[in-house]
Image: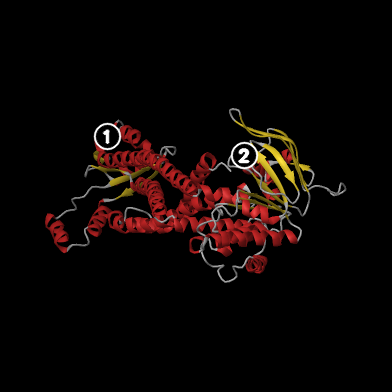
Amino acid sequence: MQTLKLWRTFKEGKENFRRNGWLTFATVSILTLSLFIVSLSFLLGLTTHLILENLRDKVSVSVSFNPDVTEGRIFEIRDELSKYKKEIASVDYISRDDALKQFLAESGNDPVIAKAIEEIGENPLLASLVIKAVTPEDYPLIVEQIEGSTFQNDISRINYAKNKKIFERLDYINKTTEKTGIALGTIFIFIAILITFNTIRITIYSHRQEFEIMRLVGASNIYVRMPFVFEGALYGLVAAVVTAISLFGIAYYIAPLTQGALPQGNFMNLYIAYFWPVFGGLILLGITLGVLSSAIAIRRYLKV
Amino acid sequence: MPEDIQPIIRFEKVAKTFPPDIAVLEDVNLTILPGEFLSIVGSSGAGKSTLLKLIYAEEDATSGEVYFDERPLSHINRKHLPFFRRQIGTVFQDFKLLPQRTAFENVAYALEVDGKSTAEINEEVPEILEIVGLGDKMHKFPKQLSGGEQQRVSLARALIHRPKVIIADEPTGNLDPVSANEIIQLLLEINSFGTTVLLATHNKGIVDTLGKRVVVISQGKIVHDQNKGKYILN
């Protein structure tokens, strides 16, 4: 019997949702906008975070040695550096020949470049050690140590400064997106609650007389109230679905910009990979917002 | 009146005062037996509606006690009020129908809130609408029905729970004489099956032809109470 009653109040709420037309449209729109902003800032935050992680893996310090430094000397230095296991994860030796092979491979085995190198007559590239730190924060320290070490005269150059700038900028973007997302999300959630609250309040006002009638024929308070709770939940549910679909649209436009920068490939792939958790979160948040706003309106305006 | 029958409704020294100090009812003592047809008459503002509201617990007595089936109404928990109300059918001057529901749905609503199954509803509602003579109009909305027909929907809804008491507050106030008479005839028919009927009205003609018990209220007090009474106003 309780399930039957629950089902009836649900149908009633569904009817209210359908009949309110314009009000329903306005409420769902603003709820959608709020959910959209919240979820988009979450996804963008996730994107910058993943790009950053991805780059962190790629970051390394490459120490190039003067052409007159022997291979044996470089091995000595490598062994010396390998002792700092707490800070340094790996030290890889790249010989002059390896460096040339890599360079040619990266330039797509361009015959023009290969010919140019041939003309020079000797390999113009330097042998180097590629150092990976355990944590990226340690790079400045490692670089400092190498610069002050006994073998500093053997070193041609250390290419770290360039990576460092990119690294810092991304970190900054990541933190800014996060802050902006939280601020905007909070504002819009607040607006959404206010508007949903008002919609339900207006419905309650326009149906005032009916509540009196319902009570007279023996409807319990909860039976009169439940439809509004369901109405609120439906606003949230519809808004969540609309948001999830609109996010596909956004992902479609952002995808080319993020091609290759993410472990998932691009933003669209990322969204697809995280679709169910995001969609579940949207539905949960949407329904919570809808129900919460109706509950406030019922408490304040439905004196039954 | 036989002494051994338990009254269905009893007022014991009931007074009702609205804030700040408007006395609407004073020292009302009234006993209504099961199966009675009681007319309550009096000019506007005499306290007829308030007296009826005390019975279906829309208002509480300021002092004294109202009993329904010898149970004091002041003891009814507000939570249980909906269950109590299902024992009383109410009919009003303004019909009080839900405008966005058909005649069928309006009557069905009273059963839905009670948790009746859809099968029961589909069986009982057409039956009762047939009784009030609306079998062919049950899928019409209130605004597609005449005043008399709307009042019959309202009456059908009041009857659907097979209540012990029907309270009709000026049920003919908005109706033409023919429709009014039809409603009164229906009330008499309902009464003949044993349901207690309380009818508050202004209509002298109706009261006088009924030949039933009449209670006259004036300025919040019962001034006449006669079996087979007439409409008397001081």
Q: Quadrant of residue B20?
A: top right
Colouring mode (rainbow / by chain / secondary structure / one colour): secondary structure
Picture coordinates of residue B50, whole percent (x, y): 63, 41
Front residue (pair B66, B199): B199
Q: Amino acid at mark 2?
A: Ala
> Which residue is painted at 63% across and 40% down in the image?
B47
Q: Give residue B56's position: percent from left, percent from top.
A: 67, 46
Numbered mark located on residue B46 in the image:
2
Q: Residues within 10 Å of mark 1 (few under 14, many from 20)?
A: few
Q: Is residue A60 left or right of residue B129?
A: left
Where residue B44 sits, quadrant-wise, is: top right
Q: Secondary structure at mark 1?
A: helix
A174 up-or-down from B196: above or below: above
The answer to whether residue A109 is above or below residue A61 is below
Q: Is residue B98 left or right of residue A216?
A: left
Decide if residue B131 is on the left or right side of residue A211: right
Mark 1 or 2: in front is: 2
Amino acid, disc 1: Gln
| Residue farthest bottom in this picture | B136
> The N terminus of chain A is located in which quarter?
bottom right
The image shows residue B203 at horizontal and vertical percentages of 60, 51
**Mark 1, chain letter?**
A
Q: Which residue is mark 1?
A: A152
Which one is nearer the viewer's eye here, A232 or A176?
Answer: A232
Q: CA distance from mark 1 to mark 2?
A: 110 Å
Q: Secondary structure at mark 2?
A: loop
Quadrant containing the C terminus of chain A in the rendered view:
top right
A125 left or right, relative to B39: left
Image quadrant of residue A83? top left
Q: Is residue A7 visible?
A: no
Q: Residue at x 37, y 55 (%)?
A: A247
Who is closer to the viewer here, A293 or A171?
A: A293
